Image (tube, helix red, strand yellow):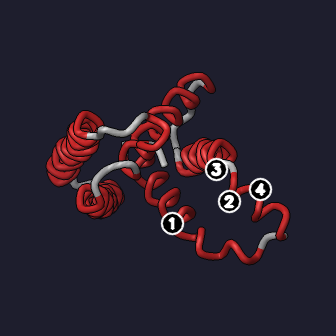
Amino acid sequence: MKDKISGIFLFMAIILGNFLDTTVGHKIETFLNNSLVSKFIIIFIIIFFTVHFSSKDIIHPFEHLILSVIIFILYIMMTRNYLYISILSFSLIIVNFIINTYITYYENKKNNEKIKEFTIYSFYMTRIIISIICISFFIRFLKSKQNIKNFLK
């Protein structure tokens, strides 16, 4: 799980690199600015490769694809959520990343007691993050009086 959290953290760093859009050609920039589908495809590709490069586990390619789809859906739900929920979710992802860094540290120190303790923290933190994102997304979705196309903008 900690490899996946590292991948998510790297993915968010890549997304924040969006402020460097002036470094690509004008035609590509115009196309990407006007096509939501192309943006989603690029985001999915980034997720797919980021999870692959950050994972130490060897998994079946189909399982890797499914994991990437789940992370993509959670990303869409997080970014189409209330601003404060998105900020809270990202903050909790950072906290979970730090927890997983402690797990790696204690694995190198071979401190099994601390590894178990921090693994439990990471397990619950991950569930809390997913729950917050899903519940608040569905609340916002149900409260939205606009159609689905405007909701996703």
Whether pointer 2 and pointer 1 mark residues with C-beta atoms closer than 8 Å, the reply is no
Regarding residue 106, the answer to whether it shows in the image is no
Binning the other alpha carbons within 10 Å of mark 3 as few (below 14), some (14 to 19) or many (20 upward) gives some
Query: On the rendered structure, is 112 left or right of 77?
Result: left
Q: Amino acid at mark 1?
A: Ala
Q: Residue at x 17, y 49 (%)?
A: 121
Q: Which residue is mark 2?
A: 33
For the residues labelled 4 and 3, the Cα–Cα distance comes to: 10 Å
Q: Which residue is mark 1?
A: 13
| N-term mark: 4 or 3 | 4
- Indicate the secondary structure of the residue bearing disc 1: helix
Whether pointer 4 and pointer 1 mark residues with C-beta atoms closer than 8 Å, the reply is no
For the residues labelled 2 and 1, the Cα–Cα distance comes to: 20 Å
The one of 84 and 10 positioned closer to us in this rendering: 84
Q: Which residue is mark 4?
A: 31
Binning the other alpha carbons within 10 Å of mark 4 as few (below 14), some (14 to 19) or many (20 upward) gives few
The one of 102 and 147 positioned closer to us in this rendering: 147
Whether pointer 3 and pointer 1 mark residues with C-beta atoms closer than 8 Å, the reply is no
Please state the horizontal and vertical placement of residue 22, each as a whole percent of the image.
Answer: 72, 77
